[in-house]
Image: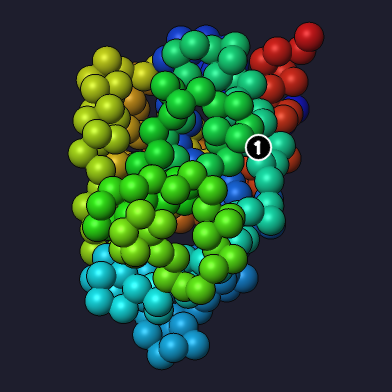
């Protein structure tokens, strides 16, 4: 392995408490598009003439649920057609060997759970596409695939209300329970933080990195892009996570 990979691997070997932060870049290698940008599912505006941030917003879901669900369904179908990649599997293996390893993910695809990450050490800060629940009566619909085959927006079998996934849409607040869980674990402290496939967009990504670095811990980032977040970490590995993470696991756990 090259020197940056060796530094990250050695830091993970020494660490007891580890925080892995993942974003959309991790799931790109599963064939999932990001929401917007070059190579993404959308560019600046949707075919309906509104920005994707507007189409996928809480107000749009309440006032024009069919339009919001048009794009929610595209994302959901893309996730159904894809599967966890080697990066997700490597993270789950790290968690199996390191009981103090947590995952904080921005992704709503559910791939960490499918790959084997334990729910009790997984913080899905933006929620998950499954299950769906009724905005009127709270009815829970587990099989979102069946509902995606119906006319949009999907309707509740119990009361006819609009169903929605437990995801944070634009203009909605992050879930208090997930934030509390993150703050509780941050208060206990981490020896190492690794950011994978994400950027400096949100405070809850920057805060753990800065806290761990200021406390003398190790920080790293695995992402082909070099940007502001690269300046905040000890090591940047500008490669694809699905290539890097299996190498790290082989080095850390050679047997």
Task: Indicate the position of residue 157 as horizontal and vertical percent values.
Answer: 41, 57
Position in image of residue 235 (x %, y %): 52, 35
Above or below, 7 against 151 in this view is: above
Residue 43 left/right relative to 133 = right
Height in image: 26 above or below 187?
below
> What residue would you read off at disc 1?
87
- Between 183 and 81, which is closer to the camera in this rendering? 81
Q: Quadrant of the C terminus?
A: top right
Q: Secondary structure at mark 1?
A: helix
- Kindly identify the residue that appears in the image at 68 percent across and 52 percent down: 82
205 or 174: which is nearer to us?
174
Which residue: 66% across, 28% down? 90
Visible in this render: residue 141? yes
Q: Is residue 3 visible?
A: no
Above or below residue 169? Residue 52 is: below
Q: Residues within 10 Å of mark 1 (few under 14, many from 20)?
A: many
Name the residue at 34% across, 73% down: 65
Residue 192 occupies quadrant: top left
Q: Quadrant of residue 33?
A: bottom right
Q: Nearer the viewer, residue 113 or 15?
A: 113
- Which quadrant: the N terminus? top right
Q: Position of residue 134 (x, y in %)?
A: 32, 55
Q: How many marks?
A: 1
């Amino acid at each position: 392995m090259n020197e940056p990979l060796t530094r990250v691997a050695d830091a993970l070997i020494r660490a007891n408490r580890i925080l892995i932060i993942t974003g959309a870049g991790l799931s790109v290698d599963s064939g999932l598009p990001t929401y917007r940008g070059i190579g993404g599912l959308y560019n600046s505006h949707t075919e309906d003439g509104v920005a994707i941030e507007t189409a996928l917003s809480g107000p749009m879901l309440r006032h024009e649920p069919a339009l919001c669900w048009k794009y929610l369904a595209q994302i959901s179908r893309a996730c159904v057609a894809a599967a966890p990649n080697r990066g997700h599997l490597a993270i789950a293996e790290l968690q199996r060997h390191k009981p103090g390893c947590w995952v904080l993910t921005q992704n709503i695809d559910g791939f960490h759970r499918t790959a084997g990450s334990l729910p009790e050490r997984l913080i899905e800060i933006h929620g998950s596409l499954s299950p769906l629940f009724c905005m009127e009566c709270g009815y829970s619909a587990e099989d979102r695939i069946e509902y995606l085959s119906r006319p949009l927006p999907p309707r509740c079998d119990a009361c006819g209300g609009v169903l929605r996934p437990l995801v944070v849409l634009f203009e909605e607040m992050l879930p208090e329970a997930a934030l509390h869980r993150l703050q509780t674990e941050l208060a206990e402290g981490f020896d190492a933080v690794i950011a994978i496939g994400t950027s400096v967009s949100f405070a809850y990504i920057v805060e753990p990195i800065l806290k761990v670095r200021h406390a003398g811990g190790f920080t790293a980032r695995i992402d082909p892009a070099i940007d502001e977040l690269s300046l905040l970490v000890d090591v940047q590995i500008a490669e694809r996570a699905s290539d890097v993470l299996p190498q790290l696991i082989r080095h850390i756990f050679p047997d």
